[in-house]
Image: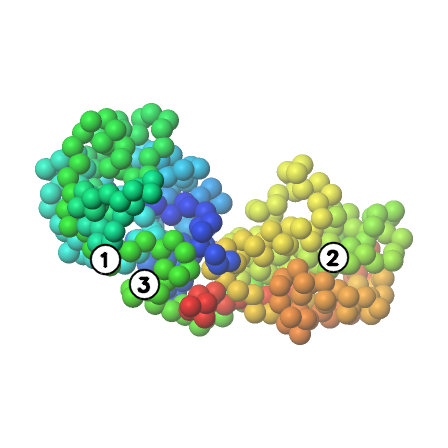
Amino acid sequence: MQDITLILLAAGSSSRFGMPTKKQWLYQDNKPLWLAVADNFQNSFNFSKIIIVGSSNETAYMKQFSNYHCVTGGNSRSSSLRQALAEVETPFVLVNDIARCCIDTAMVERVIARKKDAACIVPALKAVDTLYLDQEPIDRDKVQIIQTPQLSHTVTLKKALASTGDFSDESSAIRAIGEEVLFVEGSPRAHKLTTGNDLKRLPCLTAPATDTFVGFGIDIHPFEEGKEMKLCGITINSPFGFKAHSDGDVAIHALIDALMGASGMGDIGELFPDTDTAYAGADSALLLQNVVARIRRFGYEISNVDMTILAQSPKLLPYKQAMREQIAKLLGITTNRANIKATTAEKMGFVGREEGVTVHAVASLTYFNWEKML
């Protein structure tokens, strides 16, 4: 297959999927779905190159999982495909949606075998139900259900997508410029994962592993007089707050790092750099909510967190329960899974001299168990 590049489209928003995790990130044992599909294709066909197209906030993370070539897609299927085609050098290109995750190798072989017979080779199924269009029945023998992967001549597909128009698949774009499209027998196995209910129709899917992932975070901030103090999203009665680019909630900052560490997503400075004016004075609780949504979107669930706040001043005992409840609320977990501890530094070091506060945080994650939603 050294004359074929495989493009796997995984930049969709999963807006119709109906689960907190994007379908691309449903774990199959220890692999997100996009990676499991890529590996299955490569193990079966050994393409010249495999290109994974992800959204702008996913590709950097995708690169931590494999050596496949990752490309940032656009705001439509066509624009994403244009981005990927810029990296294709082979005469043929095979395009598949990650949502068609159950690979029928015999069907793919049928597509590839006809690669020289038309500009685009398309797997299709015959319609078996009665069909209506605008309240009138139509001849189902003239209707075909189009699937992927579709194989195209690279030069022709690039030409077809050169306009700014948007197409639902490669065959539509190629037909629009008058080139020939050839249909081969599709496969019921290539059912598309669109909503959560489709999971029941995809026998190739496997349950996520039961691994637990642990991350550690630490943050330190000096005091700043006249600034409101926030800890764990709670306002603390104090004559000083924290010197920081954001609101300085040192506890939430440590917790964000712990969560990002457990998920392997880097650190808070990469996601919310203190050189970005957008985060000047930012509410750290909102930053935490952003991270929580990101973690869930990428296939994880939060198991528990444990935090230790080292502060000589102010006294935090009156606030501990409120802080614990607020963190649990922000994380979407029960209060018993959000532990908060506070201690002094016995008057030693900068904490003991009442110059600032440091917080240590530990967080544990598991994969989102999509099977329980069936």
Q: Amino acid at mark 3?
A: Arg
Residue 347 in view here: no
Q: Is residue 23 above or below residue 87?
A: below
Q: Residues within 10 Å of mark 2 (few under 14, many from 20)?
A: many
Q: Position of residue 73 (x, y in %)?
A: 40, 39
Q: Residues within 10 Å of mark 1 (few under 14, many from 20)?
A: few
Distance from disc 2 to disc 3, alpha carbons, whole Å, reads 43 Å
Observer-nearest of 334 and 144: 144
Across the whole image, how many numbered discs are drawn on residues? Answer: 3
Residue 233 is marked as: 2
Q: Position of residue 185 (x, y in %)?
A: 15, 50
Quadrant of the rendering where the C terminus is positioned: bottom left
- As helix, strand or loop, the secondary structure at mark 3 comes to helix
Q: Which residue is mark 3?
A: 201
Left or right of residue 224, residue 93 in this image? left
The residue that appears at 17% across and 53% down in the rendered structure is 107
- As helix, strand or loop, the secondary structure at mark 1 comes to helix
Residue 188 is marked as: 1
The residue that appears at 53% across and 64% down in the rendered structure is 301
